[in-house]
Amino acid sequence: MDQPLTQPEAEPRVVYLPPPNIHWAVLFAAQFVIAILAIIFTPKAWWPLVSNLAFDVWAIYLCWWIRKLEPAAMSIFFCVAYVALQLVFTVPYGPQPMNQSLTIFGIILALLAVVLWIVTTYVVRA
C-alpha cells in the first residue's frame, strides 16, 4: 500500500501549425478598404462580387490552413465550390437585360450558395 505514486506516461504531443494571427479589427478594416476601392474602381453592378471575393480569399486561406493540419479535411473543396458558385451566381445579375428565366436561375444559384456557405462553415468548425 505504500507504493510511490508515479506519473502516467504522457503520449507524445503533436505540434500543430499556429492559427492565422490576425486581429478581427484588421480584417474588418481590410474589408472596408476593399469595399471603398470596389466602389471607386469597378462598375456598380460588380460591387458586391468584388467585395465578396475579397473576403472569400480569407475563407480559402483558413480552409487551406485546416487542410495543412488535417490532410483529409474537405473544407477547402466546399469553400472553392462556394466561390465558384458565387461567381456563377453573379453572372445573371451583371450588366445585361433581365428576364424571368435568368432571375429564377439566379435565385436557385443563390440558394445553393447559401447551402454551400453553411456546409463550409460547419465543416471548418468540425
Image (cartoon, rainbow, N blue to C red):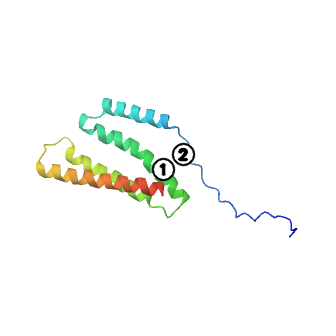
For marks 2 and 1 on the same chain, the one whose residue lies earlier in the sequence:
2
Residue 70 appears at what percent x and percent y? 53, 61
Residue 100, horizontal then vertical, whole percent: 11, 49
Residue drawn at 61 percent across, 55 percent down? 16
Which residue is rendered at x = 46% and y = 55% of the image?
Answer: 124
Q: Residue furthest bottom?
A: 1
Tag 2 near tag 1, CB within 8 Å: yes
Badge 1 marks a residue whose secondary structure is helix
Q: Secondary structure at mark 2?
A: loop
Can you identify the residue that label 2 sits on?
20
Would you name the residue on which mark 1 appears? 62
Mark 1 surroundings: few (<14), some (14-19) or many (≥20) residues within 10 A: some
Q: Which residue extends farthest right?
A: 2
- Along the viewing direction, whichever of 55 and 10 lies nearer the viewer: 10
Disc 2 marks a residue whose amino acid type is Pro
Residue nearer the viewer, 126 or 39: 126
Q: Give me the C-alpha separation between circle 2 and circle 1.
A: 8 Å
Name, please, the residue furthest toward the front.
1
78 to 29, vertically: above or below? below
- What amino acid does circle 1 point to? Leu
Q: Is residue 42 above or below residue 3?
A: above
Question: Relative to 12, is 17 on the left or the right?
Answer: left
Residue 9's tag is: none
Label 2, residues with CA under 10 Å away: few <14, some 14-19, many ≥20: few
Residue that appears at 52% across and 37% down: 23
